[in-house]
Image: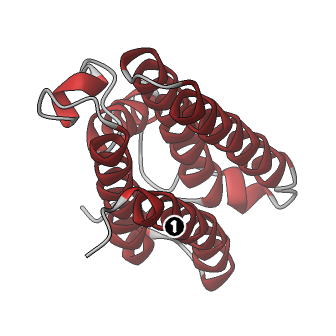
Amino acid sequence: MSYRLNADEVFEMAEQMERNAVRFYRRAAELVAGDGTQRILLDLAAMEEEHERIFASLRASLIKPEEREVQVFDPEAQNKDYLLAWADRSVFKLDEDPLAALAGDPSPYAVFTAAISKEKDSIVFYEGITPYLSNKKDTDRVHTIIQEEIGHIALLARLRRDLEPEP
């Protein structure tokens, strides 16, 4: 049986991934030395919180019943739990300490490198779920999420570039 996601499910997963990203950035801020880097990481956590609010707002704006309608037979209502578990294990993993992603190097450069990698993984995740969306409007909404994550990568890359040693 083919599984089709609806916009409600996608935005719920996006909200969960953003909550996980907030946790990653806050924990990374606790690990790194230097007030400037800690401030940047806390600012990134705040940006992820704003993304979560954006996605929650997009989710709340779903007005057509089919946008919230479960696309497969689910008599025990387990799909929601499955999708949230999928979001928890995909990019910013709930049970993974950010230090693990830093390979033991809590330098600002390593933090930004790990964050860029995770943001890229989130884009891959969102691109990977788009074939399962039920209509073009839902796909366009997910592309909104992708554009937000691309913006994070650009910011992180600029910050990391500022830390690179002069040749």
Q: Is residue 21 left or right of residue 39?
A: left
Q: Nearer the viewer, residue 119 or 9?
A: 119
The residue most toward the bottom is 136
SS assignment at label 1: helix
Q: Nearer the viewer, residue 58 or 53?
A: 53
Assign the C terminus to one quadrant of the image: bottom left
> Could you say where residue 86 lies in the image, as x and y percent from the top left?
32, 39
Query: How many numbered marks have been drawn onto this rendered protein structure?
Result: 1
The residue most toward the front is 167
Q: Residue at x 87, y 54 (%)?
A: 61
Asked which colour scheme the image uses, the reply is secondary structure
Residue tagged 1: 158
Give the quarter of the image for residue 63.
Answer: bottom right
Q: Is residue 47 left or right of residue 74?
A: right
Q: Is residue 157 above or below residue 90?
A: below
> Could you say where residue 136 lies in the image, as x and y percent from the top left?
61, 84
Mark 1: amino acid: Arg
Assign the N terminus to one quadrant of the image: bottom left
> Could you say where residue 77 lies in the image, as x and y percent from the top left?
46, 28
Give the quarter of the image for residue 15.
Answer: top right
Q: Is residue 164 above or below residue 75?
A: below
Q: Is residue 149 left or right of residue 7?
A: left
Q: Is residue 17 left or right of residue 63?
A: left
> Could you say where residue 41 lies in the image, as x and y percent from the top left?
55, 35
Q: Residue at x 51, y 43 (%)?
A: 13
Q: Residues within 10 Å of mark 1 (few under 14, many from 20)?
A: few
Q: Residue at x 30, y 62 (%)?
A: 165
Q: Residue at x 36, y 32 (%)?
A: 88
